[in-house]
Image (spheres, coloured by chain):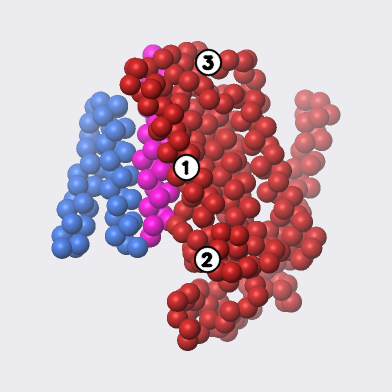
Chain colours: A red, B blue
Amino acid sequence: MKNDKTLLMNILAIVFLALLAYFIYAVATSSDVGINLMDDNVVENRVADRYLNKNVLDENSQYEWGGKAEDSAANIVTAVLADYRLFDTSLEVIVLFVTVMGFGLVLPDERRKIKESTQLLFNWLPILMTFMLLVGGYMFINGHLSPGGGFPAGAIISTAILVGILAGKQTVSHHTLKIVEAVAGISIFSLATLGFILKGSFFINFLEGGNIGDVFSAGLIPILYTLVAFKVSAELSGVYLEFYKGGEEHDHA
Amino acid sequence: MMILLASVLSILMIVAAVWVLITPNILKAIIVFAIVSLVASVLFIFMHAPDVAITEASIGAGITSAIFILSYKRISE
């Protein structure tokens, strides 16, 4: 134990793990909300069966349209991913965050300067970046209607920033990226906690569903996808900037 | 016809993956690795999984190769 701060961090980590273990146990044995993992279950309650019978086009579909938000996402993959498995995406984002922190420790310290490339790439850069940002923005805004979603959209937006660096132009600073990432991460988990306070479970979709196929539908999914896209793009752009000398000094986290 | 195209692409993918393993040039290996990811994303579209295909193309072919090349340049200096 080095000092009091290390002891405090260890105690906090153990408390956090204990809370997590308690909630996993509570979900596994609860009998009033959702599907009990510990009991034998009837086929009608299984998630996979419900989604196999879900059909947007057929009037005689076996799936009953309720007022729930999960019915209003036109893309089935998004409905499963963002309504049932959002923990997966949010923990992926945390893994990416830890990776970005580790990059600065592993790499040797000398960085290369961002130098201007050929005239051709430099002049075409605004057009290329516009197209890439348009594709990325379309992908996270339409994540609940068409294939795509927050994670690939963030990856495409960060590729636009990478093209900027390769052409010799640093379009965003390290400081801005850190602020964007922090704000997006805090917003994701406060929305999750807000769902816990309002409806009683973490990451629940507490907004109205709306019409299937509208841009403003599917409740919380577009908002969360936008936040995930901004967080992922900020993290991946931070990885690229880690290789280059920026305008300002860099501090290892 | 689609089966034939898919088989040709699969054989191309296997050949590229073996090439990645046996080539002594690391830079070439990274580029061919990107080809493996691209062919995989095309095969995902054949299997009616556009979500996975988009993710594979952007992350597997784009970002992974960029980070590999940048790290290779930094380490080989």
Label 3 or label 2, whichever lies nearer to me, is 2
On screen, residue A158 above or below B38 = above
Which residues are the magenta region? B49-77
- The structure residue drawn at horizontal position 29% and vertical position 33%, both measured from the top left corner, is B31
Query: Do the residues bearing badges 3 and 2 touch, measured as CB atoms within 8 Å?
Result: no
- The structure residue drawn at horizontal position 81% and vertical position 29%, both measured from the top left corner, is A5
| Residue B52 is inside the magenta segment | yes
Residue B16 position, x and y percent, is: 23, 41
| Residue occupied by mark 2 | A213
On screen, residue A184 above or below B40 = above
Q: Secondary structure at mark 2?
A: loop
Query: Do the residues bearing badges 1 and 3 touch, measured as CB atoms within 8 Å?
Result: no
In the drawing, does residue A1 fall left or right of residue A250? right
The quarter in which the C terminus of chain A is drawn is top right
Residue A132 position, x and y percent, is: 44, 38
Q: Secondary structure at mark 3?
A: loop
In the drawing, does residue A112 fall left or right of residue B35? right
On screen, residue A221 above or below B14 = below
**Can you tell which quarter of the image residue A182 is in?**
top right
In the drawing, does residue A16 fall left or right of residue A76? right
**Can you tell which quarter of the image residue A82 is in?**
bottom right
Chain letter behind tag 1: A
| Residue occupied by mark 3 | A245
Distance between mark 3 and mark 2 Cα atoms? 45 Å
- The structure residue drawn at horizontal position 47% and vertical position 53%, both measured from the top left corner, is A148
